[in-house]
Image: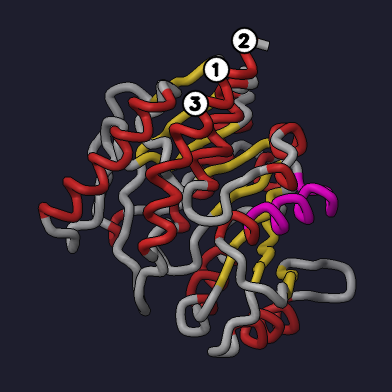
Amino acid sequence: MSVTTTPHAPQSPPAALRRPHDLPAGWGETALTVVMPTYNEAENLPRMAEALLALPLPGLRLLVVDDNSPDGTGEVAEELAARHNTADRTRVTVLHRTVKDGLGRAYAAGMDQAVAEGARYVLQMDADGSHPVEYVAQMLGTALATGAGVVIGSRYVAGGRLAEEWGAHRKLLSRWANGYVSAVLRTGLRDVTAGFAMWRADTVTAMRLSQVRSSGYSFQVELKFQAVRAGYTVVEVPIHFEERQIGMSKMTLAVQLESALLPWRMRWDAARARRH
């Protein structure tokens, strides 16, 4: 197991001052697929897609995984694909799912498809604007420079920050939840609940996503726990986590309960596996 953070990172600058990192010649051509699950994100998706496709990363593709959104997000995604794809270059693809069975299932389907289509790296990213696109190039550069199996956009390493719009209670709850999971699973990660993570293709394949039990947000935790246990190098880089741009959070009580119970189930399963 190898878990590292970027030491003594500078304080993240305001959004208006952040710029995408320049990568060495050729690195921007790396086949990178951003997997973006959506459910009722018709207003947020176009802005996020345009920002991603404007990055100086010619190898970047966007895969939208839509869970049959009633607000027409799937149709918006198809319009983006028609606008940006050409006969000799695909920049946006859409995976339409007919059943809404959780964020984890959507990510699993999208990440498997991305690897099958030739992605060298796969980036998990929300459609709501909470994960700033300015960090994508930095995360890819970190992955390439270190050879890490996973690079996490972390809110809780030096230089990482939560949205200024969050109140003290919300920030405290977020830190407590992350600390709780970290204490139970002992991964050594500062932000094990993070949803902004870049995975090397062989790491994705090794995770056997079809066997992941989490259907909700705890998918993020389960996947990182498996990667750490399997011995992959995990690097955390600081990000400034933003507030959702438009719409409401989809964190339900059932999802929160799953997130609270799953770490113990994973710990028990790991202990049982060691005994046998």
Q: CA distance from mark 3 to mark 1?
A: 6 Å
Q: Which residue is mark 1?
A: 271
The residue to which callout 3 is attached is 267
Cα–Cα gap, marks 2 and 1: 6 Å
Secondary structure state at the residue bearing disc 3 = helix
Kindly indicate whether the residue at mark 1 contacts the one at mark 2 (C-beta within 8 angstroms).
yes
Residue at image point 61% right, 36% down: 24
**For the residues bearing labels 3 and 2, Cβ distance under 8 angstroms:** no
Q: Nearer the viewer, mark 3 or mark 2?
A: 2
Amino acid carrying label 1: it is: Ala
Q: Amino acid at mark 3?
A: Arg
- What is the tally of numbered marks visible in this picture? 3
Dot 2 amino acid type: Arg
Q: Which mark is residue 275?
A: 2
* Numbered range of the magenta stretch: 107-119
Q: Is residue 62 magenta?
A: no
Q: Position of residue 177 (x, y in %)?
A: 29, 42
Q: Residue furthest right?
A: 87
